[in-house]
Image (cartoon, coloured by chain):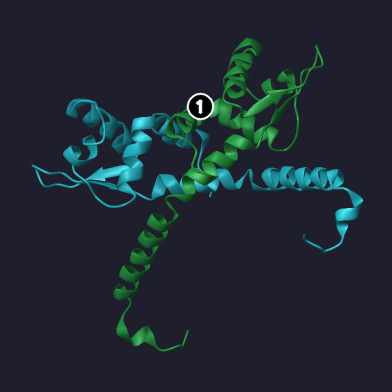
Chain colours: A cyan, B green
Amino acid sequence: MLPAYADISHTFAALADPVRLAILDRLATGEATVTELAAPFEISLPAISRHLKVLERAGLITRGREAQWRPCRLEPRPFQDVAVWLEQYRSFLEDRMDRLEEFLSTLQPKEQENDDDE
Amino acid sequence: MLPAYADISHTFAALADPVRLAILDRLATGEATVTELAAPFEISLPAISRHLKVLERAGLITRGREAQWRPCRLEPRPFQDVAVWLEQYRSFLEDRMDRLEEFLSTLQPKEQENDDDE
């Protein structure tokens, strides 16, 4: 099922930040606490917490219930939505690649058409 | 090659709007002029032009040189960048799907384990 434009545009808004993309990248390797997520960045814990709230509202992550640690984890649904959205452009992309290959093949000199490869 | 977080976050920012997503969807079927793109929306031509400028700056579309018509067309590169970005999450998503299937299989009553399918 195709995700509605309004829903997927919220996902894209949450993804429109390099720090948030780096956080997601880290979480793809496993759960992490706010402190662990903040470590590679030269920004404050409250700033990281604000980024996590944006990711949480967009459904990209959830946070554990343990009061002190509340580890963050990725949620698959929005990633699947992006994959479904991208699928619409598959035939356009394949068509453009085909035309590029066709164009490049016209540039090859005729004498290279045999299978020799010196 | 993995697109840098800063670059791909600009692509996501351009995608973070339902009207722009609908415009891209229309362009996936072929080139169109601003007037053609504006037709399905109850918003002004200048508003559509502003959306097109955002898409153009992000490299998602280019516009023809003909002074009067300037048809818009999709450009494949940013879509490919999103595909490459999404690829990082493939093993995470597959792992989550496997665990879901495993969990669901534990819910099936034992007597359904043979191959009968009444």
Location of residue B110 with respect to A82 vertically, above or below:
below
Q: Chain of mark 1?
A: B
Instruction: Choose between A67 and B59: the one closer to the eye.
Output: B59
Residue B93, quarter of picture: bottom left
Secondary structure at numbered mark 1 = loop
Q: Which amino acid, mark 1? A: Asp
Instruction: Point out residue A94 in the picture as x, y percentages from the top left corner.
Output: 70, 48
Instruction: Choose between B82 and B38: the one closer to the eye.
Output: B82
Q: Residue at x 39, y 29 (%)?
A: A17
Q: Quadrant of the C terminus of chain A?
A: bottom right
Residue B19, quarter of picture: top right
> Is residue A113 among the parts visible in the rendering?
yes
Q: Residue at x 26, y 36 (%)?
A: A40
Location of residue A117 with respect to A27 vertically, above or below:
below
Residue A70, quarter of picture: top left
Q: Residue at x 75, y 26 (%)?
A: B32
A43 left or right of B15 in image: left
Location of residue B67 with respect to B77 vertically, above or below:
above
Instruction: Point out residue B49 in the picture as x, y percentages from the top left corner.
Output: 64, 15
Instruction: Point out residue B64 in the picture as x, y percentages from the top left corner.
Output: 77, 21
Instruction: Point out residue B31 in the picture as x, y percentages from the top left corner.
Output: 76, 30
Count of marks overlaid on the render: 1
The residue beneath circle 1 is B17
